[in-house]
């Protein structure tokens, strides 16, 4: 009896026509049956936003005539895409959800803001093994070819070994030629942040407006972090979870006096 291929849901936050998702689809087609549900326009930085005050549209599209798999363009966020895929389009939970390949980093603190990772996290909430992939190159002309063997290797491991309930993988890929990538490192999220600023301007009508800018600051010199791995030529793999409870603080918090005087 022939083994049944896994059903793989592919999504992203850069939009359904972005080169990154096209590259991811090609890899996933080697591993299973692919269905694509992705935003109809870029949704970077949307985090875990969902559409609640507008109608949500989702329609089947043909990006390339030679494709045998089905693709759907969604008017909502990456999280919306996962929700509507599992509840309306697929008819069952997929065996795996992959998100990306994002144009730009989602390492360290960036995971909080990432639409790419929020799609993967939403899949994890729904009990689906999930991976978010990001390449440290913001260009639409980014070269995804060197990343493919690492994307494939990590995905095959998830399909084979599964993931614990509530855990998804955040994978970042360095912008390097294939010969310069040293391998894969399992890491923790670096303790880093953005020092943000707003560029204040005034439009011709006299109304003030702002452009968000900032500088990325990594104060974590550990050699077990995603930032260290990426800076040293490795693919970083960080297991993340949607449970935001600060478990280490629960005992201390329970000793507080909450009664009013």
Image (cartoon, rainbow, N blue to C red):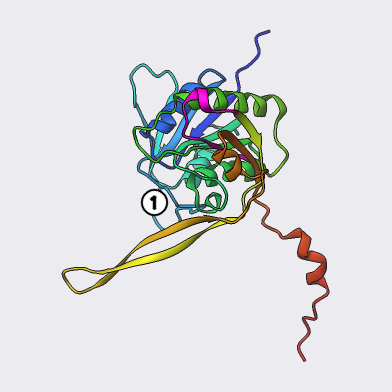
| Residue with the most extreme left position | 204
- In this picture, residue 137 sits left or right of residue 127: left
Relative depth, front residue between 77 and 218: 218
Asked if residue 177 lies in the magenta stretch, the reply is yes
* Visible residue check, residue 92: no
At which x and y percent is residue 50? 48, 53
Quadrant of the image containing the N terminus? top right
Classify residue 23 by image quadrant. top left
| Residue with the most extreme bottom position | 261
At which x and y percent is residue 141? 34, 32
SS type, badge 1: loop
- In this picture, residue 134 sits left or right of residue 197: right
Asked if residue 89 lies in the magenta stretch, the reply is no
**Residue under label 1:** 55
Quadrant of the image containing the C terminus? bottom right
- In this picture, residue 62 sits left or right of residue 216: left
Residue at image x 20%, y 68%?
A: 203
Task: Please give the range of residues in magenta.
Answer: 169-182
At which x and y percent is residue 103? 42, 39
Residue at image x 72%, y 28%?
A: 161
* Visible residue check, residue 151: yes
Residue at image x 66%, y 29%?
A: 158
Relative depth, front residue between 41 and 176: 176
At which x and y percent is residue 153? 61, 24
Crowding around mark 1 (Cα neighbors within 10 Å: few <14, some 14 to 19, many 20+) is few
Relative depth, front residue between 240 and 15: 240
């Amino acid at each position: 009896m022939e083994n049944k291929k896994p059903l793989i849901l592919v999504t992203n936050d850069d939009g359904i026509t972005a080169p990154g998702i096209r590259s991811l689809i090609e890899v996933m087609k080697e591993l299973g049956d692919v269905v694509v549900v992705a935003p109809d326009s870029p949704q970077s930085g949307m985090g875990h936003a969902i559409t609640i005050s507008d109608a949500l549209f989702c329609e089947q599209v043909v990006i390339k005539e030679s494709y045998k798999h089905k693709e759907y363009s969604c008017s909502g966020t990456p999280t919306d895409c996962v929700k509507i895929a599992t509840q309306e389009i697929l008819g069952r939970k997929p065996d795996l959800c992959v998100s990306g390949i994002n144009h730009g980093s989602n390492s360290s603190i960036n995971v909080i803001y990432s639409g790419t990772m929020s799609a993967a996290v939403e899949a994890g909430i729904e009990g689906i093994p999930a991976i978010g992939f990001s390449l440290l190159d913001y260009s639409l002309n980014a070269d995804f070819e060197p990343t493919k063997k690492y994307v494939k290797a990590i995905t095959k491991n998830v399909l084979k070994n599964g993931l614990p309930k509530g855990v998804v993988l955040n994978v970042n890929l360095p912008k390097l030629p294939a010969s310069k990538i040293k391998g894969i490192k399992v890491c923790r999220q670096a303790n880093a942040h953005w020092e943000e600023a707003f560029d204040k301007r005034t439009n011709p009508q006299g109304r003030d407006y702002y452009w968000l800018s900032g500088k990325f600051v990594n104060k974590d010199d550990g050699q077990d972090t995603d930032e260290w791995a990426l800076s040293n030529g490795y693919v970083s793999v960080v297991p993340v979870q949607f449970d935001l409870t600060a478990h280490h603080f629960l005992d201390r918090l329970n000793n507080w006096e909450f009664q009013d005087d």
